[in-house]
Image (tube, coloured by chain):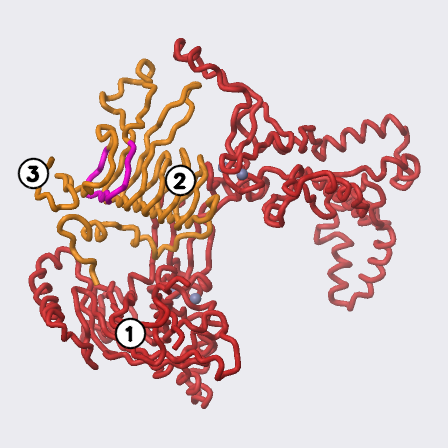
Chain colours: A red, B orange
Amino acid sequence: MAPLTPYTYIQCPCSDASTLGRQADSNSPRSPDDDELDDRAFDPRAPRSNYSLYPLDYLNYCEDCQQIRCPRCVAEEIVTYFCPNCLFEVPSSNLKSEGNRCTRSCFQCPICIGPLSVTSIESPPDPSLLAAPDGAPAPHSGPYILTCSYCNWSSTEIGIKFDKSNSIHAQLVKLNNGGTTRLTAKEHRERRKEASQDRLAGPPSALAAAASNGGENNEELDLETQFANLKSFYQSQLADAAPGGSGLSSLNDLGFSSPTSLSRIMSLYTGGTVHNSRNKSRTGTMREALISDEGLQIASLDESAAIQHLHSIDYSETITTEQSTNQPPHLGEVHPHGTSRFASSLRPIPYLLRTKRSKRCPVCRHIISKPEAKVATTRFRIKLVASAYIPTITIRPLNIPSSSTPGTLPPLQPSQFILTFQNPRFETINVTLATPAKTPGRFSSKVTVLCPQFEIDANTDVWDEALKDTSDKTKLRRRGAAGDDGTHQAEAGKIWERGRNWVSIVVEVVPASLRLDLLEATAKEDEDVLEIPMFVRVEWEVDVGGDDVGTAPSRDKEQTEERELAYWCVLGLGRVGQA
Amino acid sequence: MSRRPPRGEYIETDTGNKVARKANLVGTQNIMLGGKTVIQPEAMIRGDLARSIHPSSSSSGAAPGSNTAVAIGRYCFLSRGCCLRPPGRLYKGAFTYTALRVGDHVFIGPGSVIQAASIGSHVHIGANVVIGELAIIKEYVKILDGTVVPANMVIPSFSIVAGQPARVIGELPEGGHEAFELRELYKTVGNNPQPAPS
Ligand SMILES: [Zn+2]
Ligand SMILES: [Zn+2]
Ligand SMILES: [Zn+2]
Ligand SMILES: [Zn+2]
């Protein structure tokens, strides 16, 4: 097993059950329950914790609430839609009509999801012939195919070629696998109209038509045509039923003064007797689709053809579940009752669009992250990230006794780690740490933070650093000298090392022994990972400027104000080995 | 061959590039380094694979010597055993190489083979990654170890990419943008390396 890289995850306040609904009864006397909640240490192994712990990079910070915000609690708003392949922006109006995939020529391989490129099928002309008359247009002409450079799949495998090298999406929509042209729903309707006009002179009622042209009633429809048929069928049903005996058109029904609207409104207030009688008469005239022209499709449950086909083909010609789920909904699909299982029915996958999104604080609704709208730019208009407000915590081993399994912490022996806190703020901060003496869980390890309270200097800018470089160096050297004679011991109450805007301290752990035989149980997943819950309280003073309206009365007396931020985090130190 | 102290592992140029003596740079006249770039031992750059067809007559008077095969920006880090190789393609029916362009603050992990057309700034490429011919990688992209990016693939900004073939497996959080800066890493290698801070 690979040794575990130490990590720090931070808990977002949105998941803290003890703060939920607390605000409302903050003045009421505290119940014993509240105290219990306060005393209880955060358990990183609790099932809920999975959803609340994030690496610092993933967290935002709301300046108005002065609180951490996580991907789970922020409200996102889409700024831009774009294709991840051609990087073209898609206006949201197109999105409604065209769907959420690129409609240019961007496709993924249906076999391996690699990108497909458009290539001319014609063999490249002899380069020696071409080199001489330079400037002649490249004699690339159709047909074109889509090819995958990763797995060598090409659209010829499903019998599809294109006449033009651009707007492949529009061409593909009109092609069935095998290369036959697909009729759109409109074309279907027109053809049918022509056919029925030939057959019958009079206006055929649906039932009469069903009786007369029996064979064609179960014509196989693709999804788009079926939907179009169903829609027009029910629309005509509604139009027939709505006017009832009054002879009003269905449009008039929408007006407030129309009798139907009035009866509907009345029925809302009168217990529905009027409504009921009306509704009965209406449903009486509605019926279900009966033929394919009306959108009826009878499920073909006979799979013998597919089974027969399986006998004759190779295993590789069937598709995996993943390939089938990657397939986009294909409106030209004939068989809506269960998708196909054969590679010959796969379609190139148009790229799903990607988005740029802004984020809002869930509490105060202020925007805490907003990217520039243009696809090409990576700048942000607003970017409030937690790493600019709360200290980063890095962990490295200091003193770990040798273990029987390399890369693990030996149980029942003290191991020491250095925690380095780096202050991103331009103010000096005070940090107070608290950990439970024993980690929660079945295997409790002992934890001692040798220096739980310390001050970290401000994150002065680079020029300040250059100016006071000398003083910083002497500070560092003092620590370094202690290390030279090999007696640099971690001492309780003292920090280990200090730099410009960072402080490191030592944490000692005595891992528990993972004696499962005593518990008569099996280890749960990752139960051997030593995780320490740690409560971090950061305090700092800010200058209260004139722009801060809320604190105006006290401004005369003091120019600074105390601020604090407190949160739980979890330190993953390593795996505990066997004794 | 150099008048510098022979024990120095790196050649440090005026523009601050740190090129390992054991790095393998072929066709150096076609390799452009922006400065402050680290090239570790056994890294290879194929500057010899320069464009073989010159658009001499048709092009609008390109500067002489513009036959750059590999252009690398500032603060890039080419780890041990990686290989940068200009991609080849058919141009008017004939095979030719086109330039491989790399932005600033690009980390290329050990053993990775790069044949992209362009790699934007602030890109982290892990160990043993293969980037296929003419792939385009935009700014702020992280490619995890062992990924195979197919030829011609475009990877948009703020993607985390992994797998064989590569797919976008995640979105880079805003808080992670700073981590792409390689100024500190630059200081930790060379003939007088500084220890990494804390
Ligand atoms: Zn949250
Ligand atoms: Zn596209
Ligand atoms: Zn493929
Ligand atoms: Zn807020």
At mark 1, the secondary structure is: loop
Q: Are dots 2 and 3 on a single chain?
A: yes
Chain identifier of the residue bearing label 2 in the image: B
Q: Residue at x 30, y 71 (%)?
A: A550
Q: CA distance from mark 3 to mark 1?
A: 47 Å
At mark 3, the secondary structure is: loop
| Quadrant in which residue A473 is drawn | bottom left
Does residue A152 appear left or right of residue B127 in this picture? right
| Quadrant in which residue A437 is drawn | bottom left
Looking at the rendering, the stretch of residues picked out in magenta corresponds to B32-46
Camera-near label (2 vs 1) is 1
Residue A510: give x, y in percent of width and height. 33, 80
At mark 2, the secondary structure is: strand
Residue A239 in sight from this viewpoint? no
Which numbered circle lies on residue A482? none
Does residue A222 appear left or right of residue A526 in this picture? right
Decide which of tag 2 and tag 3 comes sooner along the chain.
3
Q: Which residue is mark 2?
A: B131
Q: Which residue is mark 1?
A: A401
The extreme front residue here reads: A404
Residue A15 in sight from this viewpoint? yes
Q: CA distance from mark 2 to mark 1?
A: 42 Å
> Dot 1 surroundings within 10 Å: few (below 14), some, or many (20 or more)?
few
Q: A527 or A485, which lies in front?
A: A485
Chain identifier of the residue bearing label 1 in the image: A
Q: Which residue is mark 3?
A: B3
Chain identifier of the residue bearing label 3 in the image: B
Per the picture, the main secondary structure of the magenta-coloured stretch is strand
> Dot 3 surroundings within 10 Å: few (below 14), some, or many (20 or more)?
few
